[in-house]
Image (cartoon, rainbow, N blue to C red):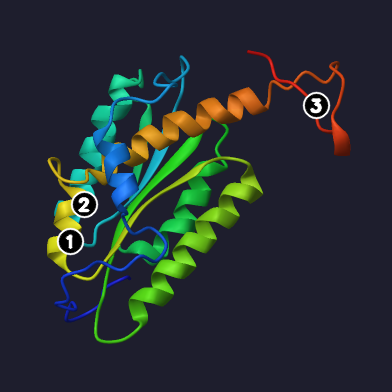
Amino acid sequence: MARASAPDPRPHSRSPVGASSDSSAKTAESGPGPSTRLPAGARLGVVLSTYHHELTGAMLDSARAELARAGLEADSLSVVEVPGAFEIPLVARALGVREDIQAVLCFGLVLKGETTHDQHIATSVSAALQRVSLDIDKPMLFGVLTCNTLEQARARALPGGHDKGREVARAAVEVLAALEKARRVDATRPRAGFGFAAQVRP
């Protein structure tokens, strides 16, 4: 499990994989992007770490509300809990290989401790999720917070702050739309260099 003792009291959050940035915070606060609706019949999966469940659960609640605004039916979100962040990739893959699941949202928390344990966990989880996504050709959305302190985690997980759950849900909707567009490349059109089609359908 991704438990790390004695959080570092330094006021500034780190910026490894999964950490929040000013630009991403502005994205979370801005209006909906160009593709804000899920296709009819869409079904998504969620892997939720129970480590600091009050924060990961808050991210899930926010993501659920955002997905509902994008057209996801209430019973079309399959949620599976795991004990910590390190266990997320394996269960995310199990969800992702299901034919009825189009994308998997992953929520967890890794806190800075007295050692570099947190860095190893954060790096391995992010790399594993990217590998799963490429292997099965489905999005794995990274909602694993990597923070120095619980205060930083609360500011990113809870509504009224960065609202990571909402951001991850929006990313899921947008990347599914992008994949749909990419897969509709018309093979009959003239091709650019390296064999790629020159245009996509509007």
Task: Mark 3 vs mark 2: give the one in front.
Answer: 3
Q: Residues within 10 Å of mark 3 (few under 14, many from 20)?
A: some
How far from the left and from the top, in percent, is residue 59?
24, 45
Question: CA separation, marks 3 and 2?
Answer: 40 Å
- Please tell me whether mark 1 sits on a helix, a strand or a loop: helix
Disc 1 marks which residue?
Answer: 152
Can residue 74 be seen here? The reply is no
Q: Residues within 10 Å of mark 2 (few under 14, many from 20)?
A: many
Type of the residue with mark 3: Ala
Type of the residue with mark 2: Arg
Disc 3 marks which residue?
Answer: 197
- The relative height of residue 185 versus residue 1 in the rendered view (above or below) is above
Type of the residue with mark 1: Gln
- Please tell me whether mark 3 sits on a helix, a strand or a loop: loop
190 sits to left or right of 121: right
Disc 2 marks which residue?
Answer: 156
Precedes in sequence: disc 3 or disc 2: 2
How far from the left and from the top, in percent, is residue 141?
44, 45
Which residue sits at x=32%, y=38%?
27
How far from the left and from the top, in percent, is residue 92?
47, 50
